[in-house]
Protein backbone atom coordinates (compact mmCIF):
# COMPACT_ATOMS: atom_id res chain seq x y z
CA UNK A 1 0.00 0.00 0.00
CA UNK A 2 2.91 2.33 0.87
CA UNK A 3 4.44 1.66 -2.49
CA UNK A 4 1.22 2.59 -4.26
CA UNK A 5 0.89 5.84 -2.33
CA UNK A 6 4.37 6.89 -3.27
CA UNK A 7 3.53 6.45 -6.92
CA UNK A 8 0.58 8.83 -6.96
CA UNK A 9 2.59 12.07 -6.65
CA UNK A 10 4.89 10.82 -9.32
CA UNK A 11 2.08 10.27 -11.77
CA UNK A 12 0.78 13.82 -11.17
CA UNK A 13 4.18 15.18 -12.27
CA UNK A 14 4.12 13.44 -15.64
CA UNK A 15 3.63 15.72 -18.60
CA UNK A 16 0.67 15.46 -20.79
CA UNK A 17 2.60 13.65 -23.47
CA UNK A 18 2.50 10.46 -21.43
CA UNK A 19 -1.05 9.95 -22.46
CA UNK A 20 0.16 8.41 -25.62
CA UNK A 21 0.16 4.64 -26.08
CA UNK A 22 3.99 4.32 -26.04
CA UNK A 23 4.32 6.07 -22.70
CA UNK A 24 1.62 3.88 -21.22
CA UNK A 25 3.56 0.75 -22.13
CA UNK A 26 6.76 2.01 -20.47
CA UNK A 27 4.86 2.93 -17.35
CA UNK A 28 3.28 -0.47 -17.17
CA UNK A 29 6.71 -2.17 -17.23
CA UNK A 30 8.05 0.05 -14.42
CA UNK A 31 5.04 -0.68 -12.24
CA UNK A 32 5.39 -4.43 -12.81
CA UNK A 33 9.08 -4.32 -11.78
CA UNK A 34 8.34 -2.55 -8.52
CA UNK A 35 5.53 -4.88 -7.75
CA UNK A 36 7.99 -7.79 -7.74
CA UNK A 37 10.10 -6.30 -4.96
CA UNK A 38 9.79 -8.04 -1.58
CA UNK A 39 7.51 -6.55 0.99
CA UNK A 40 9.09 -4.01 3.38
CA UNK A 41 11.79 -2.85 0.93
CA UNK A 42 11.72 0.91 0.53
CA UNK A 43 12.46 2.66 -2.69
CA UNK A 44 15.53 4.42 -1.28
CA UNK A 45 17.15 1.09 -0.20
CA UNK A 46 20.38 0.07 -2.10
CA UNK A 47 21.91 -3.41 -2.72
CA UNK A 48 25.28 -3.86 -1.04
CA UNK A 49 27.39 -6.60 -2.60
CA UNK A 50 30.58 -5.95 -0.67
CA UNK A 51 34.06 -5.20 -1.99
CA UNK A 52 35.29 -7.07 -5.06
CA UNK A 53 37.98 -9.68 -4.45
CA UNK A 54 40.85 -10.19 -6.92
CA UNK A 55 40.47 -13.24 -9.11
CA UNK A 56 42.95 -16.06 -8.43
CA UNK A 57 43.78 -18.02 -11.55
CA UNK A 58 43.97 -21.65 -10.47
CA UNK A 59 42.00 -23.40 -13.15
CA UNK A 60 43.21 -26.90 -12.27
CA UNK A 61 42.76 -26.70 -8.48
CA UNK A 62 39.29 -25.29 -7.88
CA UNK A 63 35.76 -24.93 -9.27
CA UNK A 64 34.94 -22.43 -11.92
CA UNK A 65 33.93 -18.92 -10.82
CA UNK A 66 30.10 -18.53 -11.04
CA UNK A 67 28.79 -15.80 -13.30
CA UNK A 68 25.77 -13.87 -12.10
CA UNK A 69 23.10 -13.48 -14.77
CA UNK A 70 21.96 -9.96 -15.57
CA UNK A 71 18.61 -8.54 -14.43
CA UNK A 72 18.36 -10.99 -11.51
CA UNK A 73 16.70 -10.26 -8.21
CA UNK A 74 18.56 -8.50 -5.42
CA UNK A 75 21.39 -10.45 -3.99
CA UNK A 76 22.52 -10.16 -0.43
CA UNK A 77 26.26 -10.24 0.08
CA UNK A 78 27.31 -13.57 1.58
CA UNK A 79 28.88 -13.69 4.98
CA UNK A 80 32.61 -13.35 5.00
CA UNK A 81 34.33 -16.72 5.13
CA UNK A 82 37.89 -17.26 6.25
CA UNK A 83 40.31 -17.59 3.40
CA UNK A 84 41.47 -21.18 2.97
CA UNK A 85 45.08 -21.34 1.81
CA UNK A 86 45.63 -23.31 -1.31
CA UNK A 87 47.23 -26.69 -0.61
CA UNK A 88 50.93 -26.90 -1.32
CA UNK A 89 51.64 -28.49 -4.66
CA UNK A 90 54.21 -31.30 -4.33
CA UNK A 91 56.00 -32.04 -7.61
CA UNK A 92 55.19 -35.50 -8.83
CA UNK A 93 58.05 -37.98 -8.59
CA UNK A 94 59.54 -38.73 -12.00
CA UNK A 95 58.64 -42.18 -13.32
CA UNK A 96 61.39 -44.81 -13.13
CA UNK A 97 63.77 -44.70 -16.06
CA UNK A 98 62.78 -47.20 -18.68
CA UNK A 99 65.47 -49.53 -20.03
CA UNK A 100 67.02 -48.34 -23.28
CA UNK A 101 65.19 -49.70 -26.29
CA UNK A 102 66.76 -52.55 -28.17
CA UNK A 103 68.74 -51.51 -31.24
CA UNK A 104 66.74 -51.78 -34.44
CA UNK A 105 68.85 -50.09 -37.09
CA UNK A 106 72.30 -51.52 -36.31
CA UNK A 107 74.06 -53.64 -38.88
CA UNK A 108 74.64 -56.29 -36.20
CA UNK A 109 71.05 -56.65 -35.05
CA UNK A 110 69.67 -60.20 -34.93
CA UNK A 111 66.27 -60.56 -36.56
CA UNK A 112 65.70 -64.30 -36.22
CA UNK A 113 67.11 -67.61 -34.93
CA UNK A 114 70.75 -68.26 -35.85
CA UNK A 115 72.62 -71.56 -36.13
CA UNK A 116 75.94 -71.52 -38.02
CA UNK A 117 79.11 -73.67 -37.90
CA UNK A 118 82.68 -73.10 -39.12
CA UNK A 119 85.50 -75.61 -39.68
CA UNK A 120 89.05 -74.18 -39.84
CA UNK A 121 91.60 -76.71 -41.10
CA UNK A 122 95.18 -75.56 -40.55
CA UNK A 123 98.55 -77.32 -40.39
CA UNK A 124 98.74 -79.34 -37.18
CA UNK A 125 95.40 -78.14 -35.81
CA UNK A 126 91.72 -78.03 -36.71
CA UNK A 127 89.14 -75.77 -35.07
CA UNK A 128 85.37 -76.29 -35.08
CA UNK A 129 83.06 -73.42 -34.10
CA UNK A 130 79.29 -73.20 -33.71
CA UNK A 131 77.22 -70.05 -33.12
CA UNK A 132 73.65 -69.76 -31.81
CA UNK A 133 71.71 -66.60 -31.04
CA UNK A 134 71.50 -65.99 -27.30
CA UNK A 135 67.68 -65.89 -27.31
CA UNK A 136 67.53 -69.47 -28.62
CA UNK A 137 70.06 -70.67 -26.04
CA UNK A 138 68.27 -68.99 -23.11
CA UNK A 139 64.88 -70.24 -24.27
CA UNK A 140 66.35 -73.75 -24.40
CA UNK A 141 67.87 -73.45 -20.92
CA UNK A 142 64.78 -71.91 -19.26
CA UNK A 143 61.66 -72.33 -21.46
CA UNK A 144 59.31 -70.61 -18.97
CA UNK A 145 61.49 -67.61 -18.13
CA UNK A 146 61.05 -64.25 -19.85
CA UNK A 147 63.98 -63.11 -21.95
CA UNK A 148 65.81 -60.03 -20.58
CA UNK A 149 66.35 -56.91 -22.65
CA UNK A 150 70.13 -57.29 -22.26
CA UNK A 151 72.62 -59.75 -20.79
CA UNK A 152 74.73 -58.48 -17.90
CA UNK A 153 78.30 -59.65 -17.24
CA UNK A 154 77.10 -61.91 -14.41
CA UNK A 155 74.50 -63.48 -16.68
CA UNK A 156 77.15 -63.94 -19.38
CA UNK A 157 79.37 -65.78 -16.92
CA UNK A 158 76.48 -68.02 -15.87
CA UNK A 159 75.66 -68.83 -19.50
CA UNK A 160 79.30 -69.69 -20.25
CA UNK A 161 79.64 -72.01 -17.24
CA UNK A 162 76.33 -73.76 -17.87
CA UNK A 163 76.85 -74.30 -21.59
CA UNK A 164 80.47 -75.41 -21.16
CA UNK A 165 79.33 -78.34 -19.02
CA UNK A 166 76.41 -79.25 -21.28
CA UNK A 167 78.37 -79.02 -24.53
CA UNK A 168 81.31 -81.18 -23.43
CA UNK A 169 80.29 -84.07 -25.71
CA UNK A 170 78.55 -82.20 -28.52
CA UNK A 171 81.45 -82.38 -30.99
CA UNK A 172 83.66 -85.24 -32.19
CA UNK A 173 86.35 -85.31 -34.89
CA UNK A 174 88.18 -88.09 -36.68
CA UNK A 175 90.97 -88.01 -39.27
CA UNK A 176 90.03 -90.76 -41.64
CA UNK A 177 89.15 -93.67 -39.35
CA UNK A 178 91.27 -92.42 -36.44
CA UNK A 179 89.33 -90.49 -33.76
CA UNK A 180 91.01 -87.40 -32.35
CA UNK A 181 90.96 -86.64 -28.66
CA UNK A 182 88.29 -84.02 -28.03
CA UNK A 183 89.28 -81.06 -25.85
CA UNK A 184 86.92 -79.22 -23.53
CA UNK A 185 84.87 -76.59 -25.38
CA UNK A 186 85.57 -72.91 -25.10
CA UNK A 187 82.27 -71.00 -24.73
CA UNK A 188 81.97 -67.24 -25.24
CA UNK A 189 79.19 -64.65 -25.36
CA UNK A 190 79.86 -62.48 -28.39
CA UNK A 191 78.20 -59.54 -30.09
CA UNK A 192 77.06 -59.20 -33.68
CA UNK A 193 76.21 -61.58 -36.48
CA UNK A 194 78.03 -64.60 -37.94
CA UNK A 195 80.87 -63.19 -40.00
CA UNK A 196 80.48 -59.78 -38.36
CA UNK A 197 81.19 -60.12 -34.67
CA UNK A 198 82.62 -57.55 -32.28
CA UNK A 199 84.66 -58.21 -29.14
CA UNK A 200 82.98 -57.55 -25.81
CA UNK A 201 84.80 -55.37 -23.32
CA UNK A 202 85.21 -56.57 -19.78
CA UNK A 203 82.03 -55.77 -17.82
CA UNK A 204 79.99 -54.76 -20.89
CA UNK A 205 76.28 -55.50 -21.23
CA UNK A 206 75.06 -56.79 -24.57
CA UNK A 207 71.56 -56.30 -25.95
CA UNK A 208 69.58 -59.51 -26.40
CA UNK A 209 69.06 -58.89 -30.12
CA UNK A 210 72.82 -58.49 -30.59
CA UNK A 211 74.03 -61.38 -28.44
CA UNK A 212 75.42 -64.69 -29.70
CA UNK A 213 76.72 -67.73 -27.85
CA UNK A 214 79.74 -69.36 -29.50
CA UNK A 215 81.28 -72.81 -28.95
CA UNK A 216 84.85 -73.67 -29.98
CA UNK A 217 86.85 -76.92 -30.07
CA UNK A 218 90.54 -77.08 -31.05
CA UNK A 219 91.96 -80.45 -32.17
CA UNK A 220 95.58 -81.48 -32.76
CA UNK A 221 95.63 -82.96 -36.28
CA UNK A 222 98.24 -83.91 -38.93
CA UNK A 223 99.72 -81.16 -41.12
CA UNK A 224 97.89 -82.30 -44.26
CA UNK A 225 94.94 -84.61 -43.52
CA UNK A 226 93.33 -86.40 -46.46
CA UNK A 227 89.90 -86.75 -44.85
CA UNK A 228 88.08 -85.35 -41.82
CA UNK A 229 84.75 -86.35 -40.25
CA UNK A 230 82.91 -83.94 -37.94
CA UNK A 231 80.04 -85.22 -35.78
CA UNK A 232 77.63 -82.79 -34.10
CA UNK A 233 75.22 -83.69 -31.27
CA UNK A 234 74.12 -80.28 -30.00
CA UNK A 235 70.65 -80.14 -31.52
CA UNK A 236 69.00 -77.61 -29.19
CA UNK A 237 65.47 -76.24 -29.34
CA UNK A 238 64.38 -78.29 -32.33
CA UNK A 239 67.22 -77.41 -34.73
CA UNK A 240 67.60 -80.05 -37.44
CA UNK A 241 70.14 -78.46 -39.79
CA UNK A 242 73.47 -76.78 -39.15
CA UNK A 243 74.95 -74.79 -42.07
CA UNK A 244 78.72 -75.20 -42.26
CA UNK A 245 81.54 -73.28 -43.93
CA UNK A 246 84.97 -74.91 -44.26
CA UNK A 247 88.20 -72.88 -44.49
CA UNK A 248 91.41 -74.60 -45.61
CA UNK A 249 94.46 -72.77 -46.88
CA UNK A 250 93.32 -69.94 -49.17
CA UNK A 251 90.12 -71.81 -50.12
CA UNK A 252 86.69 -72.31 -48.57
CA UNK A 253 83.53 -74.24 -49.30
CA UNK A 254 80.10 -74.80 -47.76
CA UNK A 255 78.28 -77.81 -46.40
CA UNK A 256 75.56 -78.85 -43.97
CA UNK A 257 75.16 -81.17 -41.00
CA UNK A 258 71.72 -82.73 -40.45
CA UNK A 259 70.28 -84.13 -37.24
CA UNK A 260 69.35 -87.32 -39.09
CA UNK A 261 72.99 -87.94 -40.19
CA UNK A 262 74.97 -85.90 -37.63
CA UNK A 263 78.33 -86.31 -39.47
CA UNK A 264 79.94 -84.23 -42.20
CA UNK A 265 82.85 -85.59 -44.26
CA UNK A 266 85.47 -83.32 -45.80
CA UNK A 267 88.04 -84.60 -48.33
CA UNK A 268 91.29 -82.81 -49.07
CA UNK A 269 91.86 -84.13 -52.60
CA UNK A 270 95.21 -82.33 -52.75
CA UNK A 271 93.69 -78.86 -52.41
CA UNK A 272 95.29 -77.95 -49.08
CA UNK A 273 99.03 -77.18 -49.38
CA UNK A 274 101.36 -78.80 -46.89
CA UNK A 275 103.38 -76.51 -44.60
CA UNK A 276 106.88 -75.53 -45.64
CA UNK A 277 109.71 -77.31 -43.82
CA UNK A 278 111.50 -75.62 -40.95
CA UNK A 279 114.53 -73.50 -41.71
CA UNK A 280 117.85 -75.26 -41.28
CA UNK A 281 119.57 -74.43 -38.01
CA UNK A 282 122.79 -72.51 -38.86
CA UNK A 283 125.88 -74.63 -38.37
CA UNK A 284 129.13 -73.27 -36.99
CA UNK A 285 131.83 -73.39 -39.72
CA UNK A 286 134.59 -75.03 -37.68
CA UNK A 287 137.71 -76.15 -39.64
CA UNK A 288 138.13 -79.90 -39.90
CA UNK A 289 140.60 -81.10 -37.25
CA UNK A 290 143.68 -83.11 -38.04
CA UNK A 291 143.05 -86.78 -37.28
CA UNK A 292 146.06 -88.32 -35.57
CA UNK A 293 146.12 -92.15 -35.93
CA UNK A 294 147.61 -92.77 -32.52
CA UNK A 295 146.83 -96.51 -32.59
CA UNK A 296 148.69 -97.03 -35.85
CA UNK A 297 151.66 -94.99 -34.62
CA UNK A 298 151.94 -97.06 -31.45
CA UNK A 299 151.67 -100.31 -33.42
CA UNK A 300 154.35 -99.31 -35.94
CA UNK A 301 156.61 -97.95 -33.23
CA UNK A 302 156.24 -101.08 -31.18
CA UNK A 303 157.05 -103.26 -34.21
CA UNK A 304 160.19 -101.27 -34.94
CA UNK A 305 161.36 -101.57 -31.34
CA UNK A 306 160.77 -105.31 -31.43
CA UNK A 307 162.66 -105.66 -34.75
CA UNK A 308 165.63 -103.67 -33.44
CA UNK A 309 165.71 -105.78 -30.31
CA UNK A 310 165.95 -108.94 -32.43
CA UNK A 311 168.80 -107.49 -34.47
CA UNK A 312 170.72 -106.40 -31.42
CA UNK A 313 170.39 -109.80 -29.78
CA UNK A 314 171.12 -111.50 -33.09
CA UNK A 315 167.88 -113.51 -32.95
CA UNK A 316 166.19 -114.80 -36.07
CA UNK A 317 162.49 -115.09 -36.57
CA UNK A 318 161.10 -118.52 -37.29
CA UNK A 319 160.03 -118.65 -40.94
CA UNK A 320 162.04 -115.59 -41.85
CA UNK A 321 161.39 -111.89 -41.62
CA UNK A 322 158.96 -111.66 -44.55
CA UNK A 323 155.88 -113.03 -42.69
CA UNK A 324 156.73 -110.76 -39.79
CA UNK A 325 156.79 -107.73 -42.07
CA UNK A 326 153.30 -108.44 -43.52
CA UNK A 327 151.81 -109.00 -40.05
CA UNK A 328 153.38 -105.82 -38.82
CA UNK A 329 152.04 -103.84 -41.81
CA UNK A 330 148.50 -105.27 -41.48
CA UNK A 331 148.42 -104.49 -37.79
CA UNK A 332 149.44 -100.92 -38.47
CA UNK A 333 146.56 -100.43 -40.89
CA UNK A 334 144.03 -101.87 -38.46
CA UNK A 335 145.27 -99.93 -35.45
CA UNK A 336 145.22 -96.67 -37.37
CA UNK A 337 141.41 -96.84 -37.38
CA UNK A 338 140.95 -97.86 -33.76
CA UNK A 339 142.58 -95.02 -31.91
CA UNK A 340 142.31 -91.65 -33.66
CA UNK A 341 142.82 -88.36 -31.82
CA UNK A 342 141.40 -85.17 -33.47
CA UNK A 343 143.69 -82.18 -33.25
CA UNK A 344 142.22 -78.69 -33.88
CA UNK A 345 144.76 -76.45 -35.42
CA UNK A 346 142.62 -73.30 -35.87
CA UNK A 347 140.27 -71.25 -33.61
CA UNK A 348 137.23 -73.20 -32.30
CA UNK A 349 134.36 -70.73 -32.88
CA UNK A 350 134.70 -68.14 -35.61
CA UNK A 351 134.05 -64.56 -34.60
CA UNK A 352 130.94 -63.00 -36.15
CA UNK A 353 131.61 -59.30 -36.76
CA UNK A 354 129.70 -58.51 -39.95
CA UNK A 355 125.99 -57.60 -40.03
CA UNK A 356 125.34 -59.72 -43.13
CA UNK A 357 126.77 -62.85 -41.51
CA UNK A 358 124.80 -62.23 -38.30
CA UNK A 359 121.56 -61.78 -40.23
CA UNK A 360 122.03 -65.15 -41.99
CA UNK A 361 122.20 -66.72 -38.53
CA UNK A 362 119.52 -64.73 -36.65
CA UNK A 363 116.76 -64.75 -39.28
CA UNK A 364 116.23 -68.55 -39.54
CA UNK A 365 116.39 -68.97 -35.77
CA UNK A 366 113.63 -66.39 -35.18
CA UNK A 367 111.59 -67.76 -38.07
CA UNK A 368 111.64 -71.24 -36.52
CA UNK A 369 110.43 -69.80 -33.22
CA UNK A 370 107.16 -68.71 -34.85
CA UNK A 371 106.89 -71.88 -36.94
CA UNK A 372 107.01 -73.91 -33.73
CA UNK A 373 103.63 -72.47 -32.77
CA UNK A 374 102.00 -73.92 -35.86
CA UNK A 375 101.73 -77.02 -33.69
CA UNK A 376 98.90 -77.35 -31.23
CA UNK A 377 100.29 -79.79 -28.65
CA UNK A 378 102.61 -78.20 -26.10
CA UNK A 379 105.15 -81.03 -26.34
CA UNK A 380 105.40 -80.57 -30.13
CA UNK A 381 105.90 -76.83 -29.71
CA UNK A 382 108.74 -77.42 -27.24
CA UNK A 383 110.42 -79.97 -29.52
CA UNK A 384 110.52 -77.55 -32.44
CA UNK A 385 111.58 -74.64 -30.26
CA UNK A 386 114.49 -76.67 -28.87
CA UNK A 387 115.96 -76.87 -32.36
CA UNK A 388 116.65 -73.11 -32.33
CA UNK A 389 116.50 -72.07 -28.65
CA UNK A 390 118.56 -73.29 -25.71
CA UNK A 391 118.72 -72.77 -21.96
CA UNK A 392 116.27 -70.93 -19.73
CA UNK A 393 115.12 -68.85 -22.69
CA UNK A 394 113.23 -71.88 -24.02
CA UNK A 395 110.52 -71.75 -21.35
CA UNK A 396 110.38 -67.95 -21.25
CA UNK A 397 110.05 -67.67 -25.01
CA UNK A 398 107.28 -70.25 -25.09
CA UNK A 399 105.14 -68.30 -22.62
CA UNK A 400 105.77 -64.88 -24.14
CA UNK A 401 105.17 -66.00 -27.72
CA UNK A 402 101.94 -67.78 -26.77
CA UNK A 403 100.70 -64.53 -25.26
CA UNK A 404 101.76 -62.48 -28.30
CA UNK A 405 100.06 -64.84 -30.76
CA UNK A 406 96.78 -65.17 -28.85
CA UNK A 407 93.95 -63.02 -30.08
CA UNK A 408 92.71 -60.32 -27.68
CA UNK A 409 89.52 -60.88 -25.82
CA UNK A 410 87.99 -64.03 -24.35
CA UNK A 411 87.97 -66.22 -27.44
CA UNK A 412 91.60 -67.38 -27.05
CA UNK A 413 92.23 -68.07 -30.76
CA UNK A 414 95.89 -68.29 -31.82
CA UNK A 415 97.31 -66.37 -34.77
CA UNK A 416 99.16 -68.32 -37.47
CA UNK A 417 102.16 -66.43 -38.85
CA UNK A 418 102.07 -66.17 -42.64
CA UNK A 419 104.96 -63.75 -43.28
CA UNK A 420 108.18 -63.06 -41.40
CA UNK A 421 111.24 -60.89 -42.03
CA UNK A 422 114.18 -59.89 -39.82
CA UNK A 423 116.92 -57.30 -40.11
CA UNK A 424 120.13 -57.04 -38.07
CA UNK A 425 121.31 -53.48 -37.48
CA UNK A 426 124.37 -54.01 -35.28
CA UNK A 427 126.53 -56.91 -34.08
CA UNK A 428 129.13 -57.11 -31.33
CA UNK A 429 130.94 -59.89 -29.42
CA UNK A 430 129.18 -61.58 -26.55
CA UNK A 431 130.71 -60.12 -23.35
CA UNK A 432 129.77 -63.24 -21.35
CA UNK A 433 131.35 -65.88 -23.54
CA UNK A 434 131.51 -67.21 -27.09
CA UNK A 435 129.04 -66.04 -29.69
CA UNK A 436 127.70 -62.58 -30.43
CA UNK A 437 124.98 -60.08 -29.54
CA UNK A 438 122.89 -58.51 -32.31
CA UNK A 439 120.55 -55.52 -32.32
CA UNK A 440 117.76 -56.47 -34.69
CA UNK A 441 114.13 -55.85 -35.58
CA UNK A 442 111.62 -58.17 -37.18
CA UNK A 443 108.09 -58.17 -38.47
CA UNK A 444 105.62 -61.05 -38.00
CA UNK A 445 102.37 -60.84 -39.95
CA UNK A 446 99.64 -63.33 -39.30
CA UNK A 447 95.93 -63.83 -39.72
CA UNK A 448 93.37 -65.73 -37.72
CA UNK A 449 89.84 -66.63 -38.69
CA UNK A 450 87.08 -67.21 -36.18
CA UNK A 451 83.32 -66.80 -35.97
CA UNK A 452 83.22 -66.52 -39.75
CA UNK A 453 85.62 -63.60 -40.27
CA UNK A 454 89.35 -62.95 -40.04
CA UNK A 455 91.61 -60.73 -37.95
CA UNK A 456 94.96 -59.54 -39.34
CA UNK A 457 97.77 -59.16 -36.87
CA UNK A 458 101.12 -57.45 -37.50
CA UNK A 459 103.72 -57.21 -34.73
CA UNK A 460 107.00 -55.32 -35.09
CA UNK A 461 109.76 -55.98 -32.55
CA UNK A 462 113.02 -54.24 -31.72
CA UNK A 463 115.28 -56.39 -29.55
CA UNK A 464 118.78 -57.52 -28.62
CA UNK A 465 119.39 -61.21 -29.15
CA UNK A 466 122.28 -63.34 -27.90
CA UNK A 467 123.48 -66.15 -30.16
CA UNK A 468 125.72 -68.85 -28.65
CA UNK A 469 127.40 -71.97 -30.14
CA UNK A 470 125.85 -75.19 -28.78
CA UNK A 471 127.05 -78.54 -30.15
CA UNK A 472 128.47 -76.98 -33.29
CA UNK A 473 125.21 -75.09 -33.96
CA UNK A 474 124.13 -71.53 -33.39
CA UNK A 475 121.32 -71.27 -30.82
CA UNK A 476 119.26 -68.39 -29.50
CA UNK A 477 120.10 -68.14 -25.79
CA UNK A 478 119.14 -64.56 -24.88
CA UNK A 479 116.35 -62.15 -25.86
CA UNK A 480 115.78 -58.63 -24.58
CA UNK A 481 112.76 -56.99 -26.22
CA UNK A 482 113.09 -53.21 -26.22
CA UNK A 483 110.00 -52.18 -28.22
CA UNK A 484 106.85 -53.86 -29.52
CA UNK A 485 104.44 -52.25 -31.97
CA UNK A 486 101.14 -53.83 -32.94
CA UNK A 487 99.58 -52.68 -36.19
Image (tube, rainbow, N blue to C red):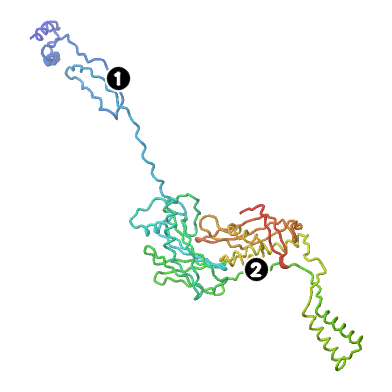
Do labels 1 and 2 touch, CB within 8 Å? Answer: no
Left of 73 or right of it: where is 53? right
Q: Residue at x 34, y 58 (%)?
A: 143
Residue sitting nearer the eye, 170 or 309: 309
Please identify the quadrant where the N terminus is shown. top left
Q: In the structure shown, which secondary structural element does the residue marked by tag 2 occupy?
A: loop
The image position of residue 269, as x and y in percent, is 54, 75
In which quarter of the view is residue 18 placed?
A: top left
**Is 96 above or below relative to 180?**
above
Q: Residue furthest bottom?
A: 319
Left of 333 or right of it: where is 157? left
Q: Is residue 251 visible?
A: no
The image position of residue 53, as x and y in percent, is 28, 18
Please identify the quadrant where the C terminus is shown. bottom right
Q: Is residue 62 visible?
A: yes
Residue sitting nearer the eye, 485 or 117: 485
Left of 340 or right of it: where is 83? left
Q: Which residue is labeled 2 in the image?
A: 278
Q: Which residue is labeled 1 in the image?
A: 54
Q: In the structure shown, which secondary structural element does the residue marked by tag 1 occupy?
A: loop
Q: Residue at x 47, y 66 (%)?
A: 244
The image position of residue 108, as x and y in percent, is 46, 54
In which quarter of the view is residue 354 placed?
A: bottom right
Label 2 neighbourhood size at 10 Å, few (<14), some (14-19), many (20+)? some
**Is 466 above or below relative to 285?**
above
Label 1 neighbourhood size at 10 Å, few (<14), some (14-19), many (20+)? few
Amino acid sequence: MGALISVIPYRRMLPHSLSSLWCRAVLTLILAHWACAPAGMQAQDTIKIGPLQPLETLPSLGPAVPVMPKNQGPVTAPAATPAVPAPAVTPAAPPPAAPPPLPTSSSITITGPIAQAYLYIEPYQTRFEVIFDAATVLAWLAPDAALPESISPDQQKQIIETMASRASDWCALSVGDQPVSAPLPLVAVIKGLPGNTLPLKEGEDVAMNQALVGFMWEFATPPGPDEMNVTWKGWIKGTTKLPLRIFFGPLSETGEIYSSVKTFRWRNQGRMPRPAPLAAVPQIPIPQPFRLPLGGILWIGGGLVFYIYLKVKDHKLPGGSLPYFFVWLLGGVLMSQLLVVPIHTGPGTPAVTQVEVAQRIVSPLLRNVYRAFDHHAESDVYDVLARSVDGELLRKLYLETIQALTLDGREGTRVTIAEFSATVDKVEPNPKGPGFVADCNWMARGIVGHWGHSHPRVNIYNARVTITPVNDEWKLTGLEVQEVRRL
